[in-house]
Amino acid sequence: MNERSDPHDMLDDVAVYALGALSPGDVRRVRAHIASCTLCAEEYASLRPAATAIGLSAETIGDARACPSTLLKPRIMAMVRSGKTHPARAVTLLPRRSAAARGTIWPAYLVAAACIAIAIVSSMWNVALTGQLKQTQQELARATQRSSSLADTLTDERSTLSDLLGADAKHYVQGNADVVTRGSRAYIAMHDLAEPPRGKVYQAWTLPKGSKKMVPSLTFEPDAHGDAVIALPSDARATAVIAVSLEPEGGSKQPTTKPILVVPLT
Amino acid sequence: MTHDADMLMAQVRERDADAFESLYDMHHRLVYGVALRMLAESSAAEDVTQTVFLKVWNSPELYRGGNFAAWIVRVTRNRALDVLRGRAARNEIELPEGLPEGEAMEETAFARIDAERVRNALAALPAEQREPIELGFFGGITHAEIARRSGTPLGTVKTRIRSGLRKLRTALDETVTA
């Protein structure tokens, strides 16, 4: 695009610039022109709010299919409240298998990179101080081995999270719960969950296909913000119903209270 | 809502996680909706949504008041454009630079406009104007690419975009003052 003497041509370019649909080279030219042309600056100021308002049309309200997963908010809030929100220090909420298994995971590649970096720095420090290169190399080898082992473990956790957010995962949204299945794996994500009374815990249940007897699964408690995400050990493909009830600490063999969640899987 | 958002952002600057959570509740559908419309993939849209809100938390000073929804739409669009550029790089297609963030803009006029009103105003535009506008905003492609895809002369595309934006501006003004 060349700058023209005809102001009407430039006004068209200003409109495309306001929309954000100019190529980088044209952006620079139009931006420079606007800085020196009152007519075009006014046109830009007039059209830019309308262009931005177009984005508002994409807001999704009342359409569950066009809403993010219920897992997203707990994940973001866990990062915010833990103070680990920068990309280089990102952590992700670990889907909980039980109350005791709550925690967070670091992306495996990040852990591996961090461990290796620490090992390298440690190695250089030793060399500078003692000159004992052989010992340093042994330490580096051990650290690398440890990081590799840890990375393998966390890769498994990461793949679990990938299940939860996978495009092919099936979501069964019911009230404050989102039951997610992907292949053989099943998860329960709940939010705004009340703290169980003293001596009580929440317990998950599964009903195998073709069975009439609920099978006890994991017990769990919500975190301080009422969020709970657990990964069920049973095979989702062989499960007809997933339920949650309030049970005595330690869990029950059969539900002793009316379930707060009953989700048939299709 | 902008007033609420301004107050919440002031609290976010003080590292108030509850205020941040309220902002998320108020705007996550907007952020996710823009990202989903641009990327057409839920997992990518969620990634962008996470990135945008973490940016709000990590760099609240980038919002300098005005229309919070408009600001977060721009941030979201820019992040989604980054993703589209990444995809395009693999296909060797040139894509445009995103809208600059943080520019002081007078956008408070539309601070109380909801999605339905904008959708109605867009729907009222002639298709020949609405389509290049939506392609340019959500498709993340240049007007030259729009012209190529539609087989329309470049000058015609630009004129239609401008005419459409002017009508949209007028329609939204009427909505605000109605």
Image (cartoon, coloured by chain):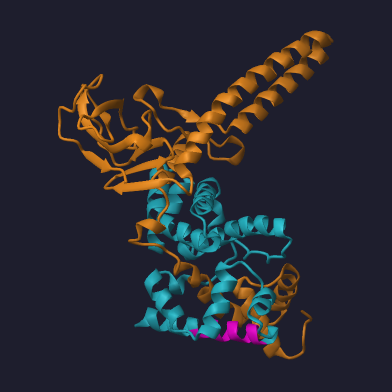
Chain colours: A orange, B cyan
Q: Where on the picture, by quarter, is residue B7?
A: bottom left
Question: Is residue B30 in sight in this rendering?
Answer: yes
Farthest front residue in view: A210
Q: Is the stretch drawn in magenta largely helix, strand or loop? A: helix
Residue B165 colored magenta? Answer: yes
Where is B146 relative to A152, above or below?
below
Query: Where's residue B158, x and y in %?
Result: 64, 83
Farthest left residue in view: A257
Query: Where's residue B49, x and y in %?
Result: 50, 52
* Closer-to-camera residue (A115/A206): A206
Where is A53 relative to A151, above or below?
below
Residue A51 colored magenta? Answer: no
* B86 displayed left or right of A192: right
The residue drawn where x is 27% and y is 42% is: A263
Q: Where on the picture, by quarter, is residue B38?
A: bottom right
Query: Where's residue B32, x and y in %?
Result: 46, 57
The residue drawn where x is 33% and y is 47% is: A172
Quarter in which the N terminus of chain A is drawn: bottom right
Where is A42 relative to A201, above or below?
below
The residue drawn where x is 48% and y is 49% is: A167
**How many numbered badges does the structure rendering display?**
0
* B83 displayed left or right of A243: right
Which contiguous range is marked in magenta? B156-167
